[in-house]
Image (spheres, rainbow, N blue to C red):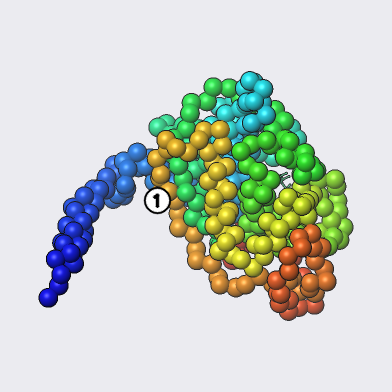
Amino acid sequence: MPSKSLLLISFVTLAVSVNAASITPKRATCPDGATTTKNAACCSFFALAEDLQKKIFLNECGEDAHEALRFSFHEAITFSKVLAAQGKFPGGGADGSFLIFLDVEANFLPANAGLSDSVDFLLPVLGRHPDITAGYFVQFAGAVAVGNCPRAPRLQFMAGRLKVTAPGPQGLIPLPEDSVDNTERTTSTPLSPPLLSIATFSHLIPNSSLRHFSRELASPGTANSTSEAASPLPLTSGDESGELRLQSDFALARDPRTACTWQNFVNQKQAMTNAFANAMLKLSVVGVGASKHIDCSEAMPVPAAPNGKGASYPATKSFKDVQQACKAPFPSLPTNLGATETVIPHCPAGATDCDS
Ligand code: HEM
């Protein structure tokens, strides 16, 4: 016969589970009549995700998705702990100030050169969603863009931004020609060099001409400018992008503060994906904090499942090409078959025309 205490435990367990079932929060139905959500405040984001996907990104990890992601970084990074400590305006971080003070921040050159395309396609979408502020909008668009990219994580999205009061201060966006010391000084955000270097894994997104993380560790070939490090892989060839290796990524992959961060993720897809998602969440709330936000992550697209393939060296390359800056043993990787390295294509797999 069961003891009294066992009976009591079973009763309590039963009572707790009945209670849990009865207090499951009711999901709110959005104005479209079909979408349900934990929090009615997230309804606007489902509508925005649909608009971005249908009109801009076309559910692809193409040029516009890359640009929206890069834009979300430049928007968020304009916040300085150093200025705050000096009692000066530190910038609003991920507050949307770029879109509100366009005449000011678009002229933060050379850092923001080339971002006008993103502004051109993002502003009309923002105009169609008057209940969404610029700060939410920019980070949400960047996170939706990531979700379109194969092997990318489904990012979290926290709704809740402060009102924009002023443009961010100039000089807080890192440049590709910067040393790691400079990058650390320039950004001086709550993102430490390792966290920032994890966020730069964004440069690995497929069909961005900036690729391949483990290739960052390979020894150089030829360089074209001070912002570009020599790449061991084919550069632009005909219509295909080829590889562009940023000097700043090259430096982060070798600096004592960050070299092991890079190397430890070689062939560790899940750990890398989780770390990237965490860094991106921190970046998306720079200067605005995350505590009072509503979690609207369920409005994010679900990325395609990873292909299960492990890391490998490009054809013709092997461990002898690795410039190892981290003392930990380097993982053993196979080499892709072939007499030459594949040129990085311009368009996502299967697409022949991907220019907007
Ligand atoms: C040290 C920090 C960083 C520097 C110096 C830097 C610099 C650059 C530069 C110069 C380009 C343009 C390359 C070209 O001409 O095609 C670029 C592209 C890009 N960056 Fe960064 N970046 C940094 C960090 C980040 C971070 C943290 C993110 C995302 C969170 C990011 C996202 C992107 C994306 C998605 C592109 C590709 C854009 C496209 O294909 O149109 N970057 N970055």
Tell me if residue 16 can be seen: yes
> In the visual, does 68 lie left or right of 22?
right
Residue receiving disc 1: 298
Residue at 73% x, 36% y is: 185
Label 1, secondary structure: give it.
helix
- Residue 308: x %, y % from top left: 56, 72
> In the visual, does 203 lie left or right of 37?
right
Residue at 76% x, 48% y is: 248
**Would you call the spot at circle 1 few (<14 residues within 10 Å), some (14-19), or many (20 or more)?**
some
- Residue 78: x %, y % from top left: 63, 33
Give the amino acid at mark 1: Glu
- Residue 19: x %, y % from top left: 19, 53
- Residue 106: x %, y % from top left: 66, 31
Front residue of this view, candidates 72 and 62: 72
Whether 63 is drawn above or below 313: the answer is above
Front residue of this view, candidates 47 and 293: 293
Residue at 82% x, 52% y is: 229
Screen quadrant of the N terminus: bottom left
Tell me if residue 340 can be seen: no
Residue at the limit of the structure toward the left, as seen here: 1
Count of labels shown?
A: 1
Among the 4 quarters of the image, the one containing residue 271: bottom right
Residue at 54% x, 57% y is: 274
Whether 188 is drawn above or below 59: the answer is above
Whether 25 is drawn above or below 128: the answer is below
Q: Does the residue labelled 1 lie within 8 Å of ligand 1?
A: no
